[in-house]
Image: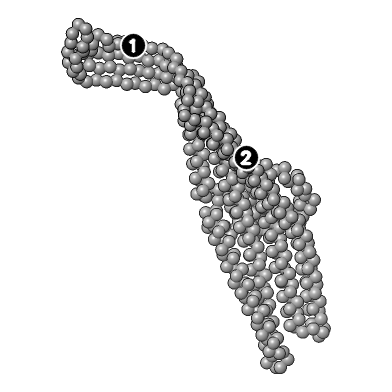
Amino acid sequence: MRTRAIFLCLLLFTSLEAKNDSLVKLCEHGIKNNPRIKSYTHRVSASHSVYDQSVDQYKPHFDMSGQYGRQNYQYESVSGIRPYNGLSYNYQFTLKQPVYRAQLLHMMTDARAKEKLTRLQEKDEKAKLITQILQTSVELIRQKKIVVILQKKTVLLEKAYATIVDRYNIKLASGTDKSQSLAKLEQSRAELIKAKQIYAYNLYNLRLLTKYENVEKYISKLSFNITAVEKAYRKANFLNLRKNMRNNTRIMLDEQSTKIAKIQIGLRNSERSPKLDAVLSYGDAGGTIDYVTRRNDSRAMLQLSFPIYQGGYVDDRVKEAKFLYMAAQEDTENTRLNIEISMEKTMQDIKGGIASVKAQKSAVAASKKYFEGTVESYKNGMQSLTDVYLAESDYYDNQLRLINNESDLILSVVGMYYYIGKSDLKYVGQVQNKYFK
């Protein structure tokens, strides 16, 4: 007995645990298998290599050059002409260490900033993918509930139509009643077919987004916790939510692009900066050589290069970079405004959705009460069976409206999480634990 109780507890705990992180599992499948995110993972590695390249250019460079072969020439001097013919060779080793390269320093800063940009792009792609997976999951839950209600409604209308046909056959119902009942039945059947098609379409989309076939097991037992949404957003302050907008990955991307545009100004301006290198070299020659050839030549020197005039080329490049920086600033501000507008609309959708759900719950309760009253009236002989069918059909219609209102509300909440920069696996678990059950 005790063993059985322990087994049942473990089974219950396992099922609850699987239910509590089912959306997280779906998002993990998507992030792991999505080719675009894989692409950005490789891009991050590539951008880090670019930074390494810029650092490597500041490290010592060691070169070796040499020649070996036969030479035949005549050397003319005041004393006469001397012929030379035979094998000869020469070689030289050079070690160069950059001491000051302003352009290289700016290249390091630029490469590091671009690496961060690539990481932000990867983060933004993950955020958008997670949002898509959550939204598609909500649509699947919606359509599954709609299919169940429409199946019940269709069965009900089939019974109603059969009853009216029987009444029509004994001259107790008109042809208009019969046609109207058939029209409602066919409309319900069409709505059911459409709902099943939408469900199949969303199921296919979710499989593509997650690269996983058996996605239904993760959402089959999920439903919405609207009460939690009402508690969280009934007194929500838009100004407080807007403070979190700075964490939005799209805004962070544009801000980083603006920083890179500013770095580009310094990078291009550094093209006219002096370059200072320390150079060590050693060389020797042998074979058939003349008396002016240097032997055992070793040098240690500082090499200075100072660009003076490039025909205005660098000035024009700096001017271009400044305009691009100003454009990047405006792009960032435009993105911030657009997201703020979207956040405001989403907040209004959430507030309106809460009110709509509340009103629709009242409508569902009223239609249920009316349906139950119609059943009692039918039992007492005061109303017909057709009236009962119509009352029950109206009850199902109100349930469908409630399902749509609840789904739209959850979709708005998911969208808000993206706008405030909380679309990652950590917050997916929070969303499921709070707003799903």
Residue of label 2: 329
Specify the amino acid type for callout 2.
Gln
Q: Residue furthest bottom?
A: 170
Q: Nearer the viewer, residue 137 or 96?
A: 96
Quadrant where the image shows the C terminus: bottom right
The image's mark for residue 297 is 1
Q: Point out the tag, 2 or 1, that comes first from the N-terminus.
A: 1
Give the total of numbered labels: 2
Percent coordinates x, y for residue 410 in the rendering? 69, 56
- Bin the neighbour count of mark 1 within 10 Å (Cα to Cα): few under 14, some 14-19, many 20 and up: few
Percent coordinates x, y for residue 377 in the rendering? 81, 81
Q: Nearer the viewer, residue 77 or 135?
A: 77
Q: CA distance from mark 2 to mark 1?
A: 56 Å
Percent coordinates x, y for residue 241 in the rendering? 73, 46
- Bin the neighbour count of mark 2 within 10 Å (Cα to Cα): few under 14, some 14-19, many 20 and up: some
Does residue 17 appear in the picture of this structure?
no
Asked if 164 appears above or below 51 in the picture, the reply is below
Q: How is the image coloured?
A: one colour
Specify the amino acid type for callout 1.
Asp
